[in-house]
Image (tube, rainbow, N blue to C red):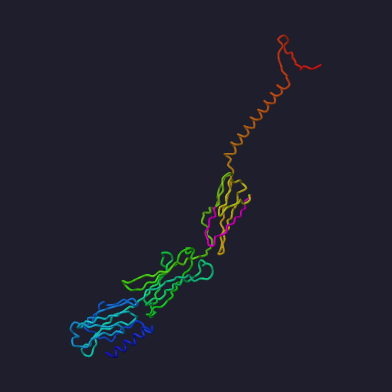
Amino acid sequence: MEIMSLLSIFLTFLSLSGLWGNFYVLACGICADNPVFTPPKLFVELGSPATATCSVCRQACQNRKFGLEKSIGREQRHGTTIVWTVDKMIPILPVLCYYNGANRTQCCSHLPVTVYKYPEKVILLLDYDGAAMVEGNQYTAKCYVENVAPVKILNVRFYQGSNELGRQRLYKNTRKNPTTVTYDFQFNATKEMDGSNFWCEGQLDLETLNKTTTSGFATANVFYKPQFLGNASETINLTVGDPLHLNCSTEGNPIPLVTWNTSAAAAIPTFEGDVLSVDSVTTAHEGRYTCFIANTVGGTTVEFNVTVQVNYNIIIPSTVAALGALAMVAAAVVVYVFYYRVTRTGEYNTKDPNRSGTKHVALPNQEL
Protein backbone atom coordinates (compact mmCIF):
# COMPACT_ATOMS: atom_id res chain seq x y z
CA MET A 1 0.00 0.00 0.00
CA GLU A 2 3.04 2.29 0.06
CA ILE A 3 2.62 2.93 -3.69
CA MET A 4 -1.05 3.76 -3.19
CA SER A 5 -0.14 6.19 -0.40
CA LEU A 6 2.28 8.02 -2.67
CA LEU A 7 -0.29 8.04 -5.45
CA SER A 8 -2.93 9.44 -3.10
CA ILE A 9 -0.61 12.21 -1.92
CA PHE A 10 0.32 13.09 -5.51
CA LEU A 11 -3.29 13.22 -6.64
CA THR A 12 -4.19 15.31 -3.62
CA PHE A 13 -1.52 17.78 -4.64
CA LEU A 14 -2.96 17.92 -8.15
CA SER A 15 -6.43 18.48 -6.74
CA LEU A 16 -5.38 21.28 -4.42
CA SER A 17 -3.45 22.97 -7.20
CA GLY A 18 -6.50 22.91 -9.46
CA LEU A 19 -4.71 20.86 -12.14
CA TRP A 20 -6.85 17.79 -11.67
CA GLY A 21 -10.60 17.41 -11.33
CA ASN A 22 -12.56 14.82 -9.40
CA PHE A 23 -10.58 11.59 -9.43
CA TYR A 24 -11.86 8.20 -8.43
CA VAL A 25 -9.64 5.19 -7.79
CA LEU A 26 -10.45 2.58 -10.40
CA ALA A 27 -7.95 -0.09 -9.30
CA CYS A 28 -10.42 -1.78 -6.96
CA GLY A 29 -11.55 -5.28 -7.79
CA ILE A 30 -15.15 -6.46 -7.78
CA CYS A 31 -15.84 -8.10 -4.43
CA ALA A 32 -18.95 -9.50 -2.85
CA ASP A 33 -18.05 -7.88 0.46
CA ASN A 34 -16.82 -4.33 -0.25
CA PRO A 35 -16.13 -1.80 2.49
CA VAL A 36 -19.07 0.46 3.42
CA PHE A 37 -18.76 4.15 4.37
CA THR A 38 -21.17 5.92 6.69
CA PRO A 39 -22.23 8.41 5.43
CA PRO A 40 -21.81 7.27 1.78
CA LYS A 41 -20.73 10.80 0.76
CA LEU A 42 -19.58 13.78 2.74
CA PHE A 43 -20.26 17.53 2.39
CA VAL A 44 -18.04 19.63 4.65
CA GLU A 45 -17.68 23.40 4.82
CA LEU A 46 -14.14 24.63 4.37
CA GLY A 47 -12.33 24.77 7.72
CA SER A 48 -14.96 22.74 9.58
CA PRO A 49 -14.43 19.39 11.31
CA ALA A 50 -15.60 16.13 9.74
CA THR A 51 -15.88 12.45 10.54
CA ALA A 52 -16.84 9.24 8.74
CA THR A 53 -16.81 5.52 9.53
CA CYS A 54 -15.72 2.63 7.31
CA SER A 55 -16.94 -0.90 7.98
CA VAL A 56 -14.16 -2.70 6.14
CA CYS A 57 -15.88 -6.10 5.80
CA ARG A 58 -18.07 -8.67 7.50
CA GLN A 59 -15.91 -11.81 7.17
CA ALA A 60 -13.68 -11.62 4.07
CA CYS A 61 -11.03 -9.33 5.50
CA GLN A 62 -10.37 -11.29 8.70
CA ASN A 63 -6.65 -11.83 9.09
CA ARG A 64 -5.98 -9.78 5.94
CA LYS A 65 -4.37 -6.42 5.48
CA PHE A 66 -6.83 -3.50 5.45
CA GLY A 67 -6.69 0.19 6.02
CA LEU A 68 -7.67 3.73 5.03
CA GLU A 69 -6.03 5.89 2.37
CA LYS A 70 -6.43 9.60 3.05
CA SER A 71 -4.38 12.76 2.55
CA ILE A 72 -5.34 14.42 5.85
CA GLY A 73 -6.92 13.45 9.16
CA ARG A 74 -6.44 10.61 11.59
CA GLU A 75 -8.01 7.19 11.99
CA GLN A 76 -8.98 4.93 14.84
CA ARG A 77 -9.56 1.19 14.45
CA HIS A 78 -12.12 -0.86 16.31
CA GLY A 79 -11.75 -4.36 14.91
CA THR A 80 -12.60 -4.08 11.21
CA THR A 81 -14.23 -0.68 11.70
CA ILE A 82 -12.19 2.47 11.01
CA VAL A 83 -13.22 5.96 12.21
CA TRP A 84 -11.73 8.84 10.17
CA THR A 85 -11.63 12.30 11.74
CA VAL A 86 -10.50 15.72 10.42
CA ASP A 87 -10.28 18.83 12.60
CA LYS A 88 -10.25 21.44 9.80
CA MET A 89 -11.26 20.30 6.35
CA ILE A 90 -9.47 21.42 3.19
CA PRO A 91 -10.17 20.38 -0.42
CA ILE A 92 -9.08 16.74 -0.80
CA LEU A 93 -9.55 13.68 -3.02
CA PRO A 94 -12.00 10.92 -2.06
CA VAL A 95 -10.97 8.83 0.91
CA LEU A 96 -10.26 5.13 0.14
CA CYS A 97 -11.12 2.19 2.44
CA TYR A 98 -9.64 -1.16 1.37
CA TYR A 99 -8.62 -4.67 2.23
CA ASN A 100 -6.57 -7.27 0.34
CA GLY A 101 -8.72 -9.98 -1.12
CA ALA A 102 -7.91 -13.39 -2.48
CA ASN A 103 -5.75 -13.90 -5.57
CA ARG A 104 -3.97 -10.57 -5.00
CA THR A 105 -7.15 -8.58 -5.60
CA GLN A 106 -7.94 -5.50 -3.63
CA CYS A 107 -11.46 -4.79 -2.40
CA CYS A 108 -12.12 -1.12 -1.76
CA SER A 109 -14.69 1.71 -1.65
CA HIS A 110 -14.24 5.43 -1.82
CA LEU A 111 -15.88 8.22 0.15
CA PRO A 112 -16.64 11.26 -2.07
CA VAL A 113 -15.79 14.40 -0.09
CA THR A 114 -17.09 17.80 -1.23
CA VAL A 115 -15.42 20.69 0.55
CA TYR A 116 -17.51 23.79 -0.05
CA LYS A 117 -17.55 27.46 0.75
CA TYR A 118 -20.64 29.59 0.33
CA PRO A 119 -20.18 32.78 -1.72
CA GLU A 120 -19.08 35.76 0.31
CA LYS A 121 -20.84 38.16 -2.01
CA VAL A 122 -22.84 38.19 -5.25
CA ILE A 123 -22.92 41.34 -7.40
CA LEU A 124 -24.84 42.01 -10.62
CA LEU A 125 -23.95 44.75 -13.11
CA LEU A 126 -25.69 45.70 -16.35
CA ASP A 127 -22.91 46.12 -18.90
CA TYR A 128 -23.70 48.93 -21.34
CA ASP A 129 -22.26 52.26 -22.42
CA GLY A 130 -24.01 55.58 -22.08
CA ALA A 131 -26.86 56.78 -19.92
CA ALA A 132 -29.36 54.11 -20.93
CA MET A 133 -30.00 51.01 -22.98
CA VAL A 134 -31.96 51.27 -26.22
CA GLU A 135 -34.88 49.03 -27.07
CA GLY A 136 -33.93 46.22 -29.46
CA ASN A 137 -30.18 46.29 -28.74
CA GLN A 138 -28.34 43.42 -27.08
CA TYR A 139 -26.71 43.84 -23.67
CA THR A 140 -24.97 41.72 -21.04
CA ALA A 141 -25.79 41.17 -17.39
CA LYS A 142 -22.68 40.22 -15.40
CA CYS A 143 -22.97 38.26 -12.16
CA TYR A 144 -19.84 38.30 -9.96
CA VAL A 145 -19.67 35.52 -7.35
CA GLU A 146 -16.87 36.13 -4.85
CA ASN A 147 -14.82 33.54 -2.96
CA VAL A 148 -16.84 30.38 -3.60
CA ALA A 149 -15.90 26.70 -3.82
CA PRO A 150 -16.12 24.42 -5.63
CA VAL A 151 -17.11 26.33 -8.76
CA LYS A 152 -18.18 23.19 -10.59
CA ILE A 153 -21.32 22.76 -8.49
CA LEU A 154 -22.31 26.45 -8.42
CA ASN A 155 -25.61 27.31 -10.10
CA VAL A 156 -26.16 30.95 -11.08
CA ARG A 157 -29.60 32.30 -12.06
CA PHE A 158 -30.49 35.66 -13.60
CA TYR A 159 -33.78 37.45 -12.91
CA GLN A 160 -35.77 40.45 -14.10
CA GLY A 161 -38.17 41.15 -11.28
CA SER A 162 -39.70 37.78 -10.43
CA ASN A 163 -39.08 36.33 -13.91
CA GLU A 164 -36.12 34.01 -14.36
CA LEU A 165 -34.22 34.98 -17.50
CA GLY A 166 -31.73 32.10 -17.53
CA ARG A 167 -29.18 30.09 -15.58
CA GLN A 168 -25.56 29.04 -15.97
CA ARG A 169 -23.18 26.48 -14.52
CA LEU A 170 -19.46 26.16 -15.21
CA TYR A 171 -19.26 22.36 -15.41
CA LYS A 172 -15.73 22.37 -16.78
CA ASN A 173 -14.25 24.50 -14.01
CA THR A 174 -12.29 22.07 -11.78
CA ARG A 175 -11.01 24.56 -9.22
CA LYS A 176 -11.72 23.33 -5.69
CA ASN A 177 -10.19 26.18 -3.74
CA PRO A 178 -12.30 29.32 -3.13
CA THR A 179 -12.21 31.64 -6.12
CA THR A 180 -14.16 34.50 -7.74
CA VAL A 181 -15.98 33.80 -10.99
CA THR A 182 -17.99 35.87 -13.47
CA TYR A 183 -21.09 34.70 -15.29
CA ASP A 184 -22.46 36.53 -18.35
CA PHE A 185 -26.03 36.53 -19.58
CA GLN A 186 -26.98 38.28 -22.83
CA PHE A 187 -30.43 39.69 -23.50
CA ASN A 188 -32.28 42.05 -25.85
CA ALA A 189 -33.61 45.21 -24.20
CA THR A 190 -37.38 45.77 -24.38
CA LYS A 191 -39.52 48.67 -23.24
CA GLU A 192 -41.09 46.38 -20.61
CA MET A 193 -37.67 46.20 -18.94
CA ASP A 194 -37.56 49.95 -18.34
CA GLY A 195 -37.54 50.63 -14.61
CA SER A 196 -37.43 46.93 -13.68
CA ASN A 197 -34.87 45.41 -11.32
CA PHE A 198 -32.29 42.87 -12.51
CA TRP A 199 -30.58 40.58 -10.00
CA CYS A 200 -28.81 37.23 -9.78
CA GLU A 201 -28.25 34.51 -7.23
CA GLY A 202 -25.64 31.82 -6.60
CA GLN A 203 -26.40 28.42 -5.10
CA LEU A 204 -24.11 25.47 -4.45
CA ASP A 205 -25.57 22.08 -5.36
CA LEU A 206 -25.16 20.47 -1.93
CA GLU A 207 -28.36 18.41 -1.82
CA THR A 208 -29.84 19.12 1.62
CA LEU A 209 -27.36 21.90 2.43
CA ASN A 210 -28.41 24.26 -0.35
CA LYS A 211 -28.08 27.90 0.52
CA THR A 212 -28.77 30.80 -1.85
CA THR A 213 -26.78 34.03 -1.92
CA THR A 214 -28.44 36.88 -3.82
CA SER A 215 -27.15 40.10 -5.31
CA GLY A 216 -28.56 43.58 -4.95
CA PHE A 217 -30.77 45.14 -7.62
CA ALA A 218 -29.57 46.84 -10.81
CA THR A 219 -32.35 49.02 -12.21
CA ALA A 220 -32.66 49.08 -15.99
CA ASN A 221 -33.07 52.36 -17.86
CA VAL A 222 -34.31 51.56 -21.38
CA PHE A 223 -34.91 54.23 -24.02
CA TYR A 224 -37.78 53.40 -26.40
CA LYS A 225 -39.70 55.37 -29.01
CA PRO A 226 -43.08 56.95 -28.20
CA GLN A 227 -46.25 54.92 -28.43
CA PHE A 228 -49.77 56.34 -28.75
CA LEU A 229 -52.04 55.19 -25.90
CA GLY A 230 -55.35 56.75 -26.96
CA ASN A 231 -57.98 55.84 -29.53
CA ALA A 232 -58.02 57.94 -32.71
CA SER A 233 -61.28 57.31 -34.56
CA GLU A 234 -61.49 58.06 -38.27
CA THR A 235 -63.93 60.98 -37.85
CA ILE A 236 -65.15 62.96 -34.86
CA ASN A 237 -68.60 64.44 -35.58
CA LEU A 238 -69.56 67.53 -33.57
CA THR A 239 -72.27 70.18 -33.61
CA VAL A 240 -71.69 73.91 -33.27
CA GLY A 241 -71.38 74.69 -29.58
CA ASP A 242 -70.07 71.27 -28.57
CA PRO A 243 -66.76 70.97 -26.68
CA LEU A 244 -63.76 69.39 -28.42
CA HIS A 245 -61.16 67.30 -26.60
CA LEU A 246 -58.40 65.52 -28.54
CA ASN A 247 -56.29 63.20 -26.38
CA CYS A 248 -52.82 62.37 -27.69
CA SER A 249 -51.69 60.39 -24.64
CA THR A 250 -48.31 58.73 -25.14
CA GLU A 251 -45.57 56.87 -23.33
CA GLY A 252 -41.89 56.76 -24.11
CA ASN A 253 -38.43 57.16 -22.65
CA PRO A 254 -37.18 59.88 -22.69
CA ILE A 255 -40.52 61.67 -22.13
CA PRO A 256 -41.90 62.51 -25.61
CA LEU A 257 -42.48 66.06 -26.85
CA VAL A 258 -46.02 66.65 -28.19
CA THR A 259 -46.86 69.28 -30.84
CA TRP A 260 -50.07 69.94 -32.80
CA ASN A 261 -50.95 71.12 -36.30
CA THR A 262 -54.30 71.58 -38.05
CA SER A 263 -55.91 72.33 -41.40
CA ALA A 264 -58.87 74.04 -39.71
CA ALA A 265 -59.52 77.74 -40.31
CA ALA A 266 -59.45 78.48 -36.61
CA ALA A 267 -56.10 78.81 -34.91
CA ILE A 268 -54.91 76.00 -32.65
CA PRO A 269 -55.97 76.83 -29.10
CA THR A 270 -53.59 76.59 -26.22
CA PHE A 271 -53.20 73.04 -24.93
CA GLU A 272 -51.78 71.49 -21.82
CA GLY A 273 -49.83 68.24 -21.99
CA ASP A 274 -51.24 65.78 -24.47
CA VAL A 275 -54.83 67.12 -24.61
CA LEU A 276 -56.08 69.78 -27.06
CA SER A 277 -59.38 71.36 -25.94
CA VAL A 278 -61.94 73.80 -27.35
CA ASP A 279 -64.83 74.81 -25.06
CA SER A 280 -67.32 75.57 -27.84
CA VAL A 281 -66.62 74.74 -31.48
CA THR A 282 -67.70 76.65 -34.56
CA THR A 283 -67.60 75.61 -38.20
CA ALA A 284 -64.13 77.18 -38.31
CA HIS A 285 -62.85 74.36 -36.11
CA GLU A 286 -63.65 71.73 -38.70
CA GLY A 287 -60.60 70.06 -40.24
CA ARG A 288 -57.74 67.61 -39.68
CA TYR A 289 -55.73 67.82 -36.46
CA THR A 290 -52.28 66.18 -36.37
CA CYS A 291 -50.44 65.27 -33.20
CA PHE A 292 -46.65 64.89 -33.52
CA ILE A 293 -44.93 62.77 -30.82
CA ALA A 294 -41.13 62.44 -30.71
CA ASN A 295 -38.15 61.73 -28.49
CA THR A 296 -34.48 60.91 -29.12
CA VAL A 297 -35.28 57.32 -30.15
CA GLY A 298 -38.03 57.98 -32.71
CA GLY A 299 -41.43 59.46 -33.31
CA THR A 300 -44.94 58.92 -34.59
CA THR A 301 -47.97 60.96 -35.71
CA VAL A 302 -51.66 60.65 -34.92
CA GLU A 303 -54.45 62.25 -36.98
CA PHE A 304 -57.94 63.29 -35.87
CA ASN A 305 -60.59 64.31 -38.44
CA VAL A 306 -63.18 66.70 -37.00
CA THR A 307 -66.47 67.71 -38.66
CA VAL A 308 -68.72 70.47 -37.26
CA GLN A 309 -72.42 70.66 -38.27
CA VAL A 310 -75.07 73.32 -37.70
CA ASN A 311 -78.17 72.15 -35.79
CA TYR A 312 -81.12 73.64 -37.74
CA ASN A 313 -83.62 72.14 -35.34
CA ILE A 314 -82.41 74.71 -32.84
CA ILE A 315 -81.87 77.62 -35.28
CA ILE A 316 -85.43 77.68 -36.84
CA PRO A 317 -87.35 77.94 -33.54
CA SER A 318 -84.83 80.46 -32.33
CA THR A 319 -85.28 82.54 -35.50
CA VAL A 320 -89.09 82.44 -35.24
CA ALA A 321 -88.90 83.46 -31.63
CA ALA A 322 -86.57 86.30 -32.54
CA LEU A 323 -88.89 87.53 -35.30
CA GLY A 324 -91.86 87.37 -32.94
CA ALA A 325 -89.99 89.36 -30.39
CA LEU A 326 -89.04 91.91 -33.06
CA ALA A 327 -92.68 92.28 -34.12
CA MET A 328 -93.73 92.87 -30.55
CA VAL A 329 -91.12 95.55 -30.17
CA ALA A 330 -92.28 97.24 -33.38
CA ALA A 331 -95.88 97.28 -32.18
CA ALA A 332 -94.85 98.72 -28.89
CA VAL A 333 -92.99 101.51 -30.69
CA VAL A 334 -96.07 102.42 -32.80
CA VAL A 335 -98.30 102.57 -29.72
CA TYR A 336 -95.78 104.65 -27.88
CA VAL A 337 -95.39 107.17 -30.73
CA PHE A 338 -99.18 107.62 -31.08
CA TYR A 339 -99.63 108.08 -27.35
CA TYR A 340 -96.80 110.61 -27.26
CA ARG A 341 -98.43 112.80 -29.97
CA VAL A 342 -101.76 112.90 -28.19
CA THR A 343 -100.45 113.75 -24.78
CA ARG A 344 -97.85 116.28 -25.83
CA THR A 345 -99.81 118.43 -28.43
CA GLY A 346 -103.26 118.53 -26.77
CA GLU A 347 -105.08 117.70 -30.02
CA TYR A 348 -108.42 116.03 -29.63
CA ASN A 349 -111.73 115.37 -31.45
CA THR A 350 -115.29 115.71 -30.04
CA LYS A 351 -118.83 116.11 -31.31
CA ASP A 352 -121.06 119.28 -30.88
CA PRO A 353 -124.49 118.19 -29.76
CA ASN A 354 -126.04 120.97 -31.90
CA ARG A 355 -123.82 120.87 -34.96
CA SER A 356 -122.84 117.57 -36.08
CA GLY A 357 -119.31 117.19 -37.49
CA THR A 358 -117.98 120.50 -36.22
CA LYS A 359 -114.30 120.42 -35.32
CA HIS A 360 -113.13 122.43 -32.35
CA VAL A 361 -109.53 123.21 -31.69
CA ALA A 362 -108.36 124.32 -28.28
CA LEU A 363 -105.51 126.79 -28.51
CA PRO A 364 -103.11 127.33 -25.68
CA ASN A 365 -103.36 130.60 -23.74
CA GLN A 366 -101.08 133.32 -24.91
CA GLU A 367 -99.72 136.01 -22.70
CA LEU A 368 -100.36 139.59 -23.80
The stretch in magenta equals: 247-265
Does residue 302 appear to the left or right of 150 in the view shown?
A: right
Q: Is residue 41 above or below residue 195?
A: below
Tell me, yes or no, whether the highlighted magenta stretch contains residue 264. yes
Which residue sits at x=54%, y=69%?
130
Question: Which residue reaches farthest top?
Answer: 354
Question: Which residue reaches farthest right?
Answer: 368
Q: Which of the pair 76/180 is nearer the observer?
A: 76
Q: Quadrant of the C terminus?
A: top right
Q: Which of the pair 190/62 is nearer the observer?
A: 62
Residue 6 at x, y percent in the picture? 31, 89
Residue 124 at x, y percent in the picture? 45, 70
* Quarter location, residue 164: bottom left
Q: Is residue 221 above or below residue 81?
A: above
Does residue 153 appear to the left or right of 329 in the view shown?
A: left
Which residue sits at x=63%, y=51%?
267
Q: Quadrant of the N terminus?
A: bottom left
Count of numbered badges drawn on the protein: 0
* Quarter location, residue 291: bottom right
Tell me, yes or no, whether the highlighted magenta stretch contains residue 268. no
Q: Is residue 245 above or below residue 206?
A: above
Residue 334 at x, y percent in the picture? 68, 27
* Quarter location, residue 177: bottom left
Residue 49 at x, y percent in the picture? 30, 77
